Structures are given as C-alpha cells and as structure tokens.
Amino acid sequence: MEPESHAAPGDSRARLAKAQSSATSSAVRITQALGGIIALTSPQPPANQPLWRRVDVFARADLGEVISPGAQKDIADSLRLLVTLHNRLTDTRWTPPTAHDSAGRSILTGHGGGVTTTTSTTTATTLESVELLADVLRTVAGSLESLDTRLTAQTVFTAALPISMRAYVREIQAATARVSTQPDDAWTWESHLDAD
C-alpha cells in the first residue's frame, strides 16, 4: 500500500481541502469563544467580526474581573501568531503537491496577496504542516470554548468555581509552540514577500 505522504494528487487535494475547512471551522469557534469571554465584562462584539479583529478587541478589553492581565496577554500573544498563519492558509492559492522532501512530506507552494497592492507572498510548506496547523487551531478552539464555558458559569453561580487560568494558558501556549517556538518535526513554513 502506498504511504499517505505519497498519495495521489486527488488525495492530496482532498487532504488540503479538509485541513483548510477544519482551520476555518476552528477560527469561527475561536472567534465565538472570545466573543463570549469579552461579553462577560464588555458589550458583545459584532457577530461578523473577523478573527484578527476579535483577537485585537480581546487583547484590549478590560477583562480584569474574569481574567488576569498577564493571562489575557499570554493568550492574545499566542492567538496573534495563529491568526497570521490561519490567514495565510486560507487566503493563499495553493499548488497541489507534485514533489516530496527528503522526509517524504508533500511539498506545497502557495501564492497570496502581500501587505500592499504591489507585493505578493510566496509560502513554502508541506501538506503535513497544513494538517498540523489545523490540529493546533482545533486544540486552541477547544481550550477557549472550555474557558468561555467555565467563566460564564462562574458569573452565573454564586459559589466560586475553581478555574486554573494558568492551565488554560499553558494548554494554548503548548499547542501554539508546535508551530512556533518548539515546532513538531512535521512543521515547515516559510513565507516571504515578492515585489511585483
């Protein structure tokens, strides 16, 4: 049987589409969870607010009644990196893999818009890296949904519920580290700007 990393082009396209769909779904979940947390101390943000804006609002909100400033900053810092990677993943036109690296991973090349109208971005990665990013986003979404649920319950019930904020922060940071400071072996991601 052929190894998964050497799958047929159609299989590779299906895997890429599945990972992109999962990442998009997780981004929506993260946006909603952050909205729920923000709404505990501030007005409910607009439902159609994009993820990058929601993270910015979360970072600036006065959430001292429910989250310590240090934990809020740590979560926001982790999310900013994931927002950048998510945007690159979803805003890029990917070329289906036709080659493999020395480890047998399917090489992907993507082209997307740059920071101005006169630049574009080229991203070199692997199909396995895209799947890893989707998994990290899924993990972080689950952590934030759980945190939102616990914080909401704490405001409803008169008895204080024990919440280990540091545990949530560690979980989010550990997931993000898989694609940043302590990357998994599968992680490969290089983006650069190209002048038109």
Image (spheres, helix red, strand yellow):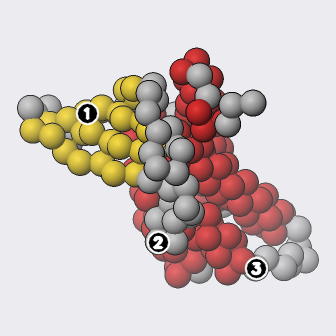
Q: Quick one: 27 or 148, which is closer to the camera?
A: 27
- The residue that label 1 is drawn on is 113
Q: Nearer the viewer, mark 2 or mark 3?
A: 2
Residue at horizontal 54%, vertical 44%? 104
| Residue farthest to the top, as pictured | 10
Residue at horizontal 80%, vertical 64%? 150
Q: Which amino acid, mark 1?
A: Gly
- The residue that label 2 is drawn on is 181
| Residue farthest to the front, as pictured | 1
Q: Position of residue 124 (x, y in %)?
A: 35, 43
Dot 3 falls on a residue whose secondary structure is loop
In the rendered image, the vertical position of residue 105 relative to residue 1, given as above or below: below
Q: Position of residue 132 (x, y in %)?
A: 59, 50
Q: Quadrant of residue 147?
A: bottom right
Q: Position of residue 38 (x, y in %)?
A: 59, 58
Q: Nearer the viewer, mark 2 or mark 1?
A: 2
Dot 1 falls on a residue whose secondary structure is strand
Q: Quick one: 79 or 57, which is closer to the camera?
A: 79
Residue at horizontal 51%, vertical 60%? 179
Residue at horizontal 54%, vertical 21%? 9
* Mark 3 to mark 1 CA distance (whole Å): 40 Å
Q: Nearer the viewer, mark 3 or mark 1?
A: 1
Q: Which amino acid, mark 2?
A: Thr
Determine crowd level at label 2: few under 14, some 14-19, many 20+ residues with C-alpha closer than 10 A. few
In the rendered image, the vertical position of residue 194 relative to residue 159, given as above or below: above
Q: Which mark is first along the chain, 1 or 3?
A: 1
Q: Position of residue 110 (x, y in %)?
A: 35, 33
Question: In the shown orientation, is residue 95 left or right of residue 177?
Answer: left
Q: Which amino acid, mark 3?
A: Ser
Question: In the shown orientation, is residue 93 left or right of residue 139?
Answer: left
- The residue that label 3 is drawn on is 164
Dot 2 falls on a residue whose secondary structure is loop
